[in-house]
Amino acid sequence: MSATPKLIIGDLEIPTLGRVDQLSQRYDPLGGQSIFRAITGRGINQETWKKTRVTTSGSGWSPPNELWRLDTSEPLILKCVAPMTLFLPAGANAVTLPQKRRTDAPPFAIARWQHQELALPVSVADDIATVDLSGIPDAEVRVSYYPEFEVWAFRPTQSADLNGAIFGWELVCEEV
């Protein structure tokens, strides 16, 4: 598995070493989805669009003053640090990656085989990730990648624990 890439939003790189002790990211689905009921009570799913909300939070010994300079009046590019995962179909060695992913952070693959987890080599051409499955037949394989979204950012929030000298922050973004 490769090292976790740096969190980047717009032209701002969030400093981590020594300043952010805890960093987390959550992906929430957004979308025009409703379940209608027929006269028999049977549910009918209707979806019209799908987007993602990304909530990033961190804490550390220094407040993230850089966040306050984000221009929330324009869409920004958010380069995420929490990987998303796809599973290889049974018998396949390749999966199509979404176009909304970081190109500066390569995808990685993990196989579950004989009660172990093994890192596997991955090569990417266009949007196809091919995993080298040599010597591990019938493994359950997941390919992870780091997403990249064009987002609207809400103004960040900040908190402080003065007794513990810890500052916290949260940044919520929604896909354009």
Image (tube, rainbow, N blue to C red):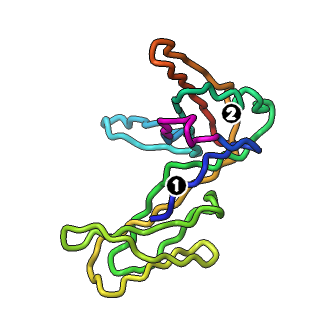
Marks 1 and 2, how far apart at CA = 22 Å
Disc 2: which residue: 153
State which quadrant residue 62 falls in: top right
What's the mark number on residue 58? Answer: none
Task: Examine the rendering and report whether any part of residue 28 can be seen.
Answer: no
Read off the residue under disc 1.
4
* Residue range (magenta): 15-25
Could you tell me the amino acid type at mark 1?
Answer: Thr
Res 30 → quadrant: top right
Whichever of callouts 1 and 2 sits on the residue coming sooner in the sequence is 1
Q: Is residue 136 above or below residue 113?
A: below
Residue mark closest to the camera, 1 vs 2: 1
Task: Provide residue 1's location: percent of width, then percent of height.
Answer: 44, 65
Residue drawn at (51%, 19%) of the image: 165
In the image, residue 126 lies in the stretch drawn in magenta: no
Specify whether 21 is left or right of 66: left
User: In this rendering, is residue 36 above or below 133?
Assistant: above
Q: Secondary structure at mark 2?
A: strand
Can I make out residue 120 in this image? yes
Question: What's the magenta bit mostly, secondary-structure-wise?
Answer: loop
- What secondary structure is found at the residue carrying circle 1? loop
Please count the marks in the image. 2
Mark 2, other Cα within 10 Å: few <14 / some 14–19 / many ≥20: many
On the image, the x and y values in percent for residue 27 come to 50, 42
Amino acid bearing label 2:
Ala
Q: Label 1 neighbourhood size at 10 Å, few (<14), some (14-19), many (20+)?
A: few
- Answer yes or no: do the residues labelled 1 and 2 have beta carbons within 8 Å? no
Name the residue at 19% across, 73% down: 114
* Viewer-side residue, 154 vs 157: 157
The x and y percentages for residue 164 are 45, 18
Q: Is residue 17 magenta?
A: yes
Q: Position of residue 88 (x, y in %)?
A: 39, 71
